[in-house]
Amino acid sequence: MKQRIFSGAQPTGRLHLGNYLGALKNWVALQDEYDSIFCIVNLHALTLPQDPKTLRQKTLDLARVYLAAGVDPEKATIFIQSDVAAHAELTWVLACIARMGELERMTQFKDKAKGSAERAGVGLFSYPVLMASDILLYQTNLVPVGQDQKQHLELTRDLAERFNRDFGETFTIPEVYIPKAGARIKSLQDPTKKMSKSDENEAGAIFLDDDADTIAKKIKRAVTDSGTEITFDETRPAIHNLLTIYQLVTGKSEQECVENFSGKGYGQFKSELAEAVVEYLRPFQERISAYDDDALNAILKTGAEKARSIASV
Ligand code: AQP
């Protein structure tokens, strides 16, 4: 029997190259080998204020993104989280064994609460418990995610182990799958921060639907470090980030990338990088309009039925 993977993204905005290289690309690569479940985690999106109508549209748009990225509904189950009530039900059970202290340690909560835990929503605080239930409901073996989710995965494993110890073997203990390169694509404007959907400065992110001109402009304006060499040097995070993007979108080895830019300046590097990103996103952008709402809704309905039947076992 195939091992199972589960992952998801929030319909909180336009997906960016970080989401693609850190997560979606790996989902597509793994879907042949694994029984794959990809969820649109709209309940997670509720942890911050949302307009209901916009959220519904973004949820459907995200399904379109999954398909255009190459997730194959014939191979993988694609569904909307709120269509499977068991996610919320298991969350309550797990919340009763989770500890306040362990949730307080979650760095994403600290970041998103912006230093004011008193005013933050309880949903934002308990978000990792919902994520644990997403994963554990499906007896998931492997969870392909970006680096920012590693801490939540560790909590998921702790909760599963605690539950199994106290109430008998119930949940599979999931492993995390974090890619070697691309696990944390940084903002083009501030390489100390991750590229993020909710960054107020849109120039920091390359969105999957950005046109060629916008991509070229954003890369041209991307901050660089002092020094001139274009190498994978961790002490120069801006160039390291741009070169990592180049490596991932071209599929070249580290050595090939460095050789390609040996003796060239930042201007030349940025223009080759922009060209490579535009080419990389072209097939995705051509496919995105191929799915109308009816086709998407049919795929999501089938996906929800399948997910419900697995979750209820
Ligand atoms: N910068 C990133 N580099 C690599 N992977 C990333 N992911 C997110 N940002 C990067 C991975 O993308 C998947 C889906 O993410 P999400 O929708 O759950 O949202 P997030 O992790 O909270 O990322 P964002 O883009 O910053 O969204 P907002 O602004 O809404 O919080 C996950 O596997 C994530 O690790």
Image (tube, rainbow, N blue to C red):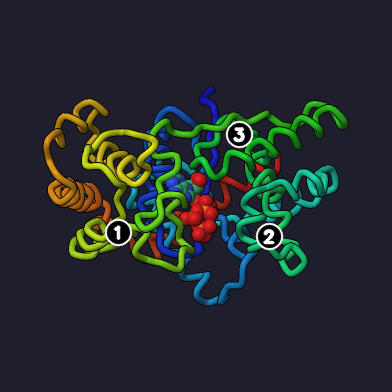
The residue tagged 2 is 124
Name the side, left or right, on which 232 lies relative to 42: left
Tag 2 or tag 3, which sits nearer the N-term?
2
The amino acid marked with disc number 1 is Ile
Cβ atoms under marks 2 and 1 closer than 8 Å: no
Report which quarter residue 231 is drawn in. top left
Measure how far apart labels 2 and 1 are at the Cα level.
Answer: 31 Å
Q: What secondary structure is found at the residue carrying circle 1?
A: helix
Which of the two marks, 3 or 2, is nearer to us in this view?
2
Number of numbered discs visible in the structure rendering:
3
User: Residue shown at 59%/55% (left/top)?
Assistant: 81
Residue 298 visible to the viewer: no
User: Residue shown at 69%/51% (left/top)?
Assistant: 130
The residue tagged 3 is 140
The amino acid marked with disc number 2 is Leu
Q: What secondary structure is found at the residue carrying circle 2?
A: helix
- Quadrant for the C terminus in the image: top right
Name the side, left or right, on which 242 lies relative to 65: left
Q: Nearer the viewer, residue 68 or 116?
A: 116
User: Residue shown at 23%/47% (left/top)?
Assistant: 280
The residue tagged 1 is 288
Q: Circle 1: is it few (<14), some (14-19), or many (20+) Cα within 10 Å?
A: some
The amino acid marked with disc number 3 is Thr
Residue 149 at x, y = what percent? 57, 43
Measure how far apart labels 3 and 2 are at the Cα level.
Answer: 24 Å
Q: Is mark 1 within 8 Å of ligand 1?
A: no
